Amino acid sequence: MGGCSGNSSTFYRVIMSTDITLVSRPLFALVDVNNFYVSCERAFNPHLINRPVVVLSNNDGCAVARSNEVKALGVKMGTPWFQLKDLVRQHGIIALSSNYTLYGDMSDRVMTILRDFSPYVEVYSIDECFLGLQGLGNLWPTATDMGQSIRNRIHQWTSLPVCVGFGATKTER
Ligand SMILES: [Mg+2]
């Protein structure tokens, strides 16, 4: 269940190192789409899969999303486009202008799917969401089962890869 990125990765690794039975104490899931803008672009253009891809900010100023291939080249979030041009030539990075209409639509699709998993949904950002899980323990044997089901359904219905972390509070690490 690798491929996690962003702030939730620490959360994910710590909590999932031992499995959790979903019991009637407070429990939250944090669902986070990996490399969200790049993953949205890949959902509609399979030629971008397994290629180094960046999405640029408004007016193509700087990198606001990076595929894992681009992260592996050491490109940091927010790197100005003019500083990337050598790497683009050397490694064939594909740079895309941002399409916030698309990302907003894909975000809505993800959040709609998540509402099937819990009635307690708190949208935290365009690609992150907390689910309240208290009282839902009879639906899933373990947190891993639930997390895997969320990942599978979102991938099947939207093509987006997500990470799911669990904690007793929204800020547990
Ligand atoms: Mg994310």
Image (cartoon, rainbow, N blue to C red):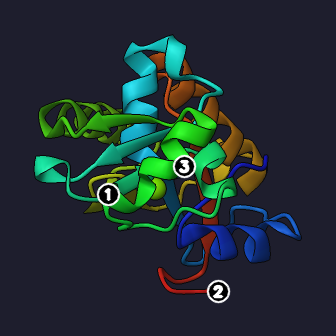
Would residue 47 be found to the left or right of residue 167 on screen? left
- Please, is residue 120 above or below residue 42 in the view? below
In the picture, the disc for residue 151 is: none
Could you tell me residue 10's position as x and y percent? 68, 76
Q: Give the alpha-carbon distance from disc 1 to disc 3, as whole Å.
A: 10 Å
Would residue 165 be found to the left or right of residue 116 on screen? right
Q: Earlier in the sequence, mark 1 or mark 3?
A: 1
Quick one: SS at disc 2?
loop
Residue at 66% over, 55% down: 73
Q: How many marks?
A: 3
In the picture, the disc for residue 87 is: 3
Q: Residues within 10 Å of mark 1 (few under 14, many from 20)?
A: few
Residue at 11% over, 49% down: 59
Q: Amino acid at mark 1?
A: Phe
Most foreground residue, 88 or 108 = 88
Tell us which disc is closer to us: 1 or 2: 1
Most foreground residue, 48 or 143 = 48
Q: Give the alpha-carbon distance from disc 1 to disc 2, as whole Å.
A: 37 Å
- Please, is residue 120 above or below residue 152 in the view? below
Q: Amino acid at mark 3?
A: Leu
Location of mark 2 (residue): 173
Could you tell me residue 75's position as x and y percent? 54, 62
Residue at 50% over, 50% down: 86
Could you tell me residue 94's position as x and y percent? 45, 32
Location of mark 1 (residue): 82
Q: Earlier in the sequence, mark 1 or mark 2?
A: 1
Quick one: SS at disc 1?
helix
Q: Give the alpha-carbon distance from disc 3 to disc 2, as whole Å.
A: 35 Å
Q: Earlier in the sequence, mark 3 or mark 2?
A: 3
Residue at 29% over, 30% down: 109
Instruction: Give the quarter of the figure containing the C terminus.
Output: bottom right
